[in-house]
Image (cartoon, rainbow, N blue to C red):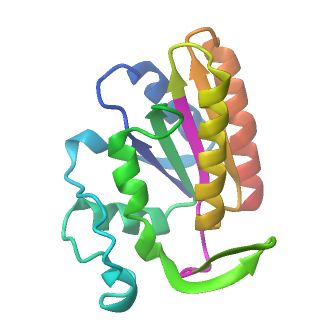
Amino acid sequence: MMKALLLDGNLKNDFDMIHSLLIEELERNGFEVESILLREVKVAACQGCFDCWVKTPGECKTDDYGRDVAKKMVQSNLIIHFTPITFGGYSSELKKVIDRFIPTILPFFIKRNGEIHHKYRYEKRASIIAVGVLDKSDEEKEAIFKELVYRNSLNMGAPVHEAIIYTNNLSKNDFIGEFTKILNKVEGTA
């Protein structure tokens, strides 16, 4: 069974319905789902010390739930970043967790697609689907969010990476239809 890790970066209970829809669709597609409401766990911001590369390879020196999330990420086939879109980016809670993924890559570099990136620490890497939520459509914020997801996914070596945006004018059925198409891509890489 494929494992999905849903990292819920919502700062309030505003998007419980969408959260439930995501879990239902993941389970319907055969995923074992673990959902983490990030505002309820203690994850410190990355200190940028790089001890996770040179002193404690693969493990952050900060002993909090961020270590657990990184381990769960490595053991997953799919990671869902679920967040309100804030100035085109992730919520503060999700951003902290994404920054704490640094131990899962190596401090060495490789040229990939004409760009310099870090080497991967693990052969198996998770696909990433980012689900951003906006009250109403905003082309600029949506474009920034999609580019951010692409760049983060490229750094993490995600075999499949997609960003999907839910706005109040999008029907639940259309949203789930888009999400399911992306899930089919992920399942095709397993």
Q: Is residue 122 magenta?
A: yes
Which quadrant of the view contains residue 151?
bottom right
Is residue 34 in sight in this rendering?
yes
Identify the residue shown where x is 47% and y is 37%.
Answer: 82
Total numbered badges shown on the rendered structure: 0
Which quadrant of the view contains residue 158?
bottom right
Residue 91 falls left or right of residue 75: left
> In what quadrant of the picture does the C terminus appear?
bottom right
Which quadrant of the view contains residue 51?
bottom left
Identify the residue shown where x is 31% and y is 87%.
Answer: 56
Q: Position of residue 5 (x, y in %)?
A: 46, 51
Q: Looking at the image, which residue sits at the far top?
A: 169
Is residue 37 in sight in this rendering?
no
Q: Position of residue 18 (x, y in %)?
A: 48, 23
Identify the residue shown where x is 39% and y is 46%.
Answer: 94
> In what quadrant of the picture does the N terminus appear?
bottom right
Residue 17 falls left or right of residue 30: left
**Can you say whether 130 is above or below 24 in the image?**
below
Q: Looking at the image, which residue sits at the far bottom?
A: 55
Residue 61 falls left or right of residue 85: left
Q: Is residue 150 magenta?
A: no
Residue 190 falls left or right of residue 86: right
Identify the residue shown where x is 72% and y is 29%.
Answer: 178
Numbered range of the magenta stretch = 120-132
Q: Position of residue 80 (x, y in %)?
A: 52, 45
Q: Position of residue 47 (x, y in %)?
A: 28, 68
